[in-house]
Image (tube, grey):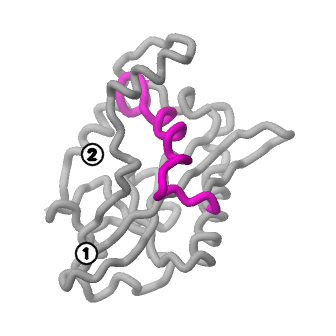
Amino acid sequence: MTREAFWNLYVPGCGEHYLTHILRSHPDFIPELDLIVEMNGQIIGNVMYTKATLTDENGNVKPILTFGPVCIKKEFQRQGYSKKLLDASFKIARKLNYEAIVIFGMPSNYVGRGFESCYKYNVTMNQTYPTAMLVKELVPDSLKGHHWSYQESAALEINQEKIDQFDKGFEPKIKKWQPSQEEFYIISHSTIQ
């Protein structure tokens, strides 16, 4: 499902299916936030979370969350299932006492879920404000008054050679370019000044 949903979307081919495969065995994986959407006994969507951190200007570390991939089966996309899935995960995350979520994604996909620019929350990565880095406070004002440096889980650092090897276990698919990849490239390689 994940391979089909992401194939050729952001790059020729995809790596999200490999990430889904390895996340559950990583210590930063949060099982309580591994959620699915079912329809008539069939899984049509999934979101997975890992731990991440924000460190303020004084060296204080705040445990936070990141998610990805979030996936809805192609024929069910744009029907509100990812909204329901994410909203359910936000409620659970609050119960687990997490105050914020930081993700990398297309802003057009996430601002409707309450995510905003990292610039608004003074959250940086390598002292820059990546355009694709988005923040959602689960607890209002929990990030206020500080400068934060984001660190994602090492689980999200995946190797292209391992993706290619893993992909050999699936039916071959053609990797090709499409316009969404250029849009993703622009967003993922730009910063806010």
Quadrant location of the N terminus in the rendered image: top right
The residue that mark 1 highlights is: 148
Three-letter amino acid code at the position of disc 2: Ser
133 in relation to 39, above or below: below
Q: Residues within 10 Å of mark 2 (few under 14, many from 20)?
A: some
User: Could you tell me residue 83's position as x and y percent?
Assistant: 61, 56
Residue 184, numbered label: none
Q: Describe residue 189's horizontal placement relative to residue 82 as left or right.
A: left
Residue 46 included in the magenta stretch of the image: no
Quadrant for residue 94, please give it.
bottom right
Between residue 105 and residue 41, name the one nearer to us: 41
Please report the residue visible at 51 percent of the width from the left and 11 percent of the height from the top.
172
Three-letter amino acid code at the position of disc 1: Trp
Please report the residue visible at 35 percent of the width from the left and 69 percent of the height from the top.
53
Residue 188, numbered label: 2
Q: Residues within 10 Å of mark 1 (few under 14, many from 20)?
A: many
Closer to the observer: label 1 or label 2? 1
Q: Describe residue 187's horizontal placement relative to residue 155 as left or right.
A: left
Please report the residue visible at 27 percent of the width from the left and 45 percent of the height from the top.
188
Quadrant location of the C terminus in the rendered image: bottom left
Please report the residue visible at 80 percent of the width from the left and 42 percent of the height from the top.
39
Quadrant for residue 31, please give it.
bottom right
Give, as a single range, the part of the protein colored magenta.
8-32
Tell how many labels: 2
